[in-house]
Image (spheres, helix red, strand yellow):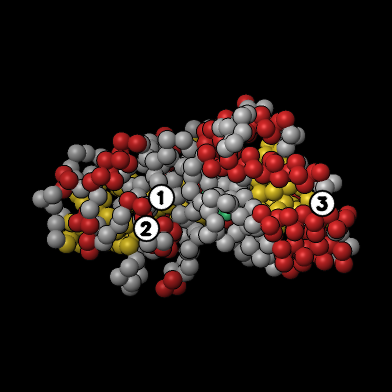
Amino acid sequence: MTDPHATTVPTLPARTDPDTDRILDSGLLHELSYAFGGPFHFLLPHRFDANLAAFRAALGDAGTEGRVYYAKKANKAAVWMERCAAHQAGVDVASAGELREALGHGVRGEHIVVTGPAKSDELLRLALLQGCLIAVDALDELDLLITLALTGTVRPARLLLRRLPPAQPHSRFGMTAAELDTALDRCVDAGDAVRMEGFSFHLSGYATQPRADLAGALVELCRKARVKGLQADRISIGGGFAVDYSSAEHWHTFLAAQRPEHYHAHKTFHSGDFYPYHSPVAGADALRTILATVPEGGQDTLAARLKDTGTLLMMEPGRALLDGAGSTVFRVQGVKDRDGYGIVTVDGTSLSLSEQWFASEYLPEPQLVTPAGRARGGAVHPACVGGASCLESDLVTWRKIPFPARPAAGDLLVYPNTAGYQMDSNESPFHDLPLPAKVVLDRSGGRPRWRLDRRPAC
Ligand SMILES: Cc1ncc(COP(=O)(O)O)c(C=O)c1O
């Protein structure tokens, strides 16, 4: 596994994270790998708490009344619901299953926003009964909700009307300006069966200016709706707060250098195929920027517009609340040499690193942890990482990662910062391999303590 071009293999290390490094150095991960006999994810709830606190601080510093709703789709673990319940934070759910999970872990119905297109009767009924806020995506959904509220025993139906982003006209979500006009009239006609609380959107991408622009437009929509006698006192700007996985220097150098020969089987990735692993403005700082931005056509910052109009700001971050809050651990099962690089096979599959299933690749590099500790050193041992299945396409990492030592059976590969969307969106027990366990690491004094995210069923 010596590559004549080894020094030219590009590298993309994740930002240094002392919390994670302490766990890597504690010896605990080899114990857990032995205990579970397969890959596992570890979760750091204190990092979720800190991210939530940072979002709330951004709101407070701008003098903005706001609420943070964790977008549950980003990770299925129970512990995030527990943290939301403990902190009286909201949760954004998009299915009856997610709603039941949030309620079951103690989140109050009134703290839940229900998003997603064409919601089922079951979901709408449950949301209505529990007093959740429902982001209505289409006129027929509004009609169904009004019918349920009029014919059921529970009213009003609390709702937001979701705006189709004018700058993303091909989005399949939300309503056009004309549809929103119709929706407002239907809300007025429905009388006390509905409580129209405002408007919402979710934008693709991570740019802050378009979010401030559309938020400014929704504030105007609220003002119009109030004239019709509707409550309309809040807007939701959805999610899309970037996560800054790697430094600017590493990211730009990597993008400029990466070529098909740096990947197993000369697989081709273009820079646009990747998540933007470096973001100059990320997480709660992106919220600060949005609040300090003057929306298109206006004169005041968004924060000032919200305050002047008595409008509450909701947001639904998923990935950003999970930044730094977990990693994924595979055990090396075998290593073979091929054309100057290694093919490492691990004890799980690429289904546990979801990016691999979107014609993309999760780029932040795994750390190699031997039984004696983290591998260090100046050597370069390039290797791609294959999954334990019979599929040619099951590559956990197509890229030849410049490992500082030759990986060996029994070593661990720890993929950093995977809690946001990577861990479990696509997991399935392929080949009858069990799903990776999720282990919550709580801090207790100087040493990490672990427990399972969910107790095994009896
Ligand atoms: C309506 C809605 N809200 C929130 C989110 C969460 O986005 P992110 O995890 O990028 O913050 C999504 C993601 O698809 C979404 O569709």
Q: Is residue 286 visible?
A: yes
Is 411 on the left or on the right of 318, as rendered?
left
Dot in front, 3 or 2: 3
How would you rate the neighbour count of disc 2 (Cα within 10 Å): few for under 14, some for 14-19, many for 20 or more?
Answer: some
Q: Position of residue 359 (x, y in %)?
A: 37, 62
Q: Earlier in the sequence, mark 3 or mark 2?
A: 3
Distance from the alpha carbon under mark 1 to that under mark 3: 38 Å
The answer to whether marks 1 and 2 mark residues whose Cβ atoms lie closer than 8 Å is: yes
User: Going by the picture, which residue comes out furthest to the left?
Assistant: 4
Q: Earlier in the sequence, mark 1 or mark 2?
A: 1
Distance from the alpha carbon under mark 3 to that under mark 2: 42 Å
Q: Hey, what amino acid is under mark 1?
A: Tyr
| Residue toward you, 13 or 300 | 300
Quarter of the image where one finds residue 250: top left
Is 222 on the left or on the right of 244, as rendered?
right
Q: Position of residue 47 (x, y in %)?
A: 53, 39
Q: Hey, what amino acid is under mark 2?
A: Ser
The kind of secondary structure element at disc 3 is strand
Distance from the alpha carbon under mark 1 to that under mark 2: 8 Å
Residue 195, numbered label: 3
| Residue found 60% across the figure and 59% down from its top | 173
| Residue found 22% across the figure and 53% down from its top | 259
The kind of secondary structure element at disc 2 is loop
Image quadrant occupied by the C terminus: bottom right
User: Under 8 Å from ligand 1: the CB of mark 2?
Assistant: no
- Residue that badge 1 annotates: 275
- Residue that badge 2 annotates: 360
Is 22 on the left or on the right of 186, as rendered?
left
| Residue found 56% across the figure and 32% down from its top | 293
